[in-house]
Image (tube, rainbow, N blue to C red):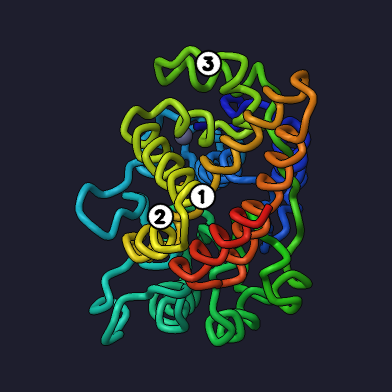
Amino acid sequence: MVFSEILGQLTAVQTLRRALAAGRLHHALRFEGPDGVGKERCAFALAQALVCTERPLEGCGVCSACTRVVTLSAEPPHVPAHPDVVLVERGLYPAGVLGRSSPETTGIGVEQIRRIVLTRATFPPHEAAHLLFIFRAAHELTVSAANALLKTLEEPRSNVHFVLLTDQPRRLLDTVRSRSLPIRFGPLADDDVRTIARGEGHELTADTLALAAGSASQALSLCDPERVERRRHFVSSVLQALAAPDLGAAVELAASESGERATLQEDLRGLAQHFAFEARARVNEGGAGAARNARRYGEVLAARQALERNGPPALTLEALIARLRRS
Ligand SMILES: [Zn+2]
């Protein structure tokens, strides 16, 4: 996963390589951009560049240090085997390790910052010249966690680096944003998405490419048979609830939701795609079909945003179906 293997993010990669070569890598970087475009791969490539023993500041991808960066332990917590690359993520570490009484469900808690980040950041790297913390979904830092991190994020000891990964940078506290340097990652070109999917054994159709909208993870999820079946089932349940004489089916469907925000987000993405497809397919038919599907598409996007702003999953779904029935 060295820099040369990162597809389609030339500007970001060049920025990092130049900073490394000049010895001017900012200690707190924020990788911003949509899901599935290579932010995390690039963070791991940066980690390899920082710890590589064969090609320091570039990464060889094959030495013991580089290999251990991308080898995650099979047992939880699934963290890199290299001791100088530390992953931070909501729910990654068992509650007991963090000294919590319950798992982290709503965000990265202050305990994870204290026990995993601050304690570690006080000591020099174990074996490499640098120590790197990679924050997955950094916008999930709770306010108290972000506040606990601020001082270290602003002035870490030398050779300590932070990469904050986020597809929702506006959800980060201003104080965190102002202390980190943004590196932007745009959607991938279709050719790059196609190449990545091919590497995983999938040939993408033009429609799948269009729906993936430049996200490799989205394209792969569109190909995964189990998830395809889940989304198909969800879409048909929603359509049934829309055609039902009253809200009974909608209430039932909402109640059957697991309450997992991420699952409903994916289901809603599938529903949005359904309406987008229908709107496109009906443009040439004339009539109101295209416009109605476009309106419904907009309603689903609004529900996804409500969910992002911490709307409760079951209620968000129920309210969405009620609105779709009126549209
Ligand atoms: Zn190496």
Residue at left offset 53%, top offset 56%? 130
| Residue 204 image label | 3
> Under tag 2, what secondary structure?
loop
| Label 1 within 8 A of ligand 1 by Cβ | no
Can residue 160 be seen here? no
Q: Which residue is mark 2?
A: 127
Residue 327 image offset from top left, x and y in percent: 68, 52
> Under tag 1, what secondary structure?
helix
Residue 189 image offset from top left, x and y in percent: 70, 24
Q: Which residue is mark 1?
A: 242
Q: In screen coordinates, is 225 left or right of 191?
A: left
Residue type (three-letter) at the residue carrying disc 1: Leu
Residue at left offset 65%, top offset 16%? 191
Q: Nearer the viewer, residue 103 or 1?
A: 103
Residue 29 image offset from top left, x and y in percent: 68, 58
Query: Farthest front residue?
Result: 245
Q: Nearer the viewer, residue 219 or 130?
A: 219
Residue type (three-letter) at the residue carrying disc 3: Leu
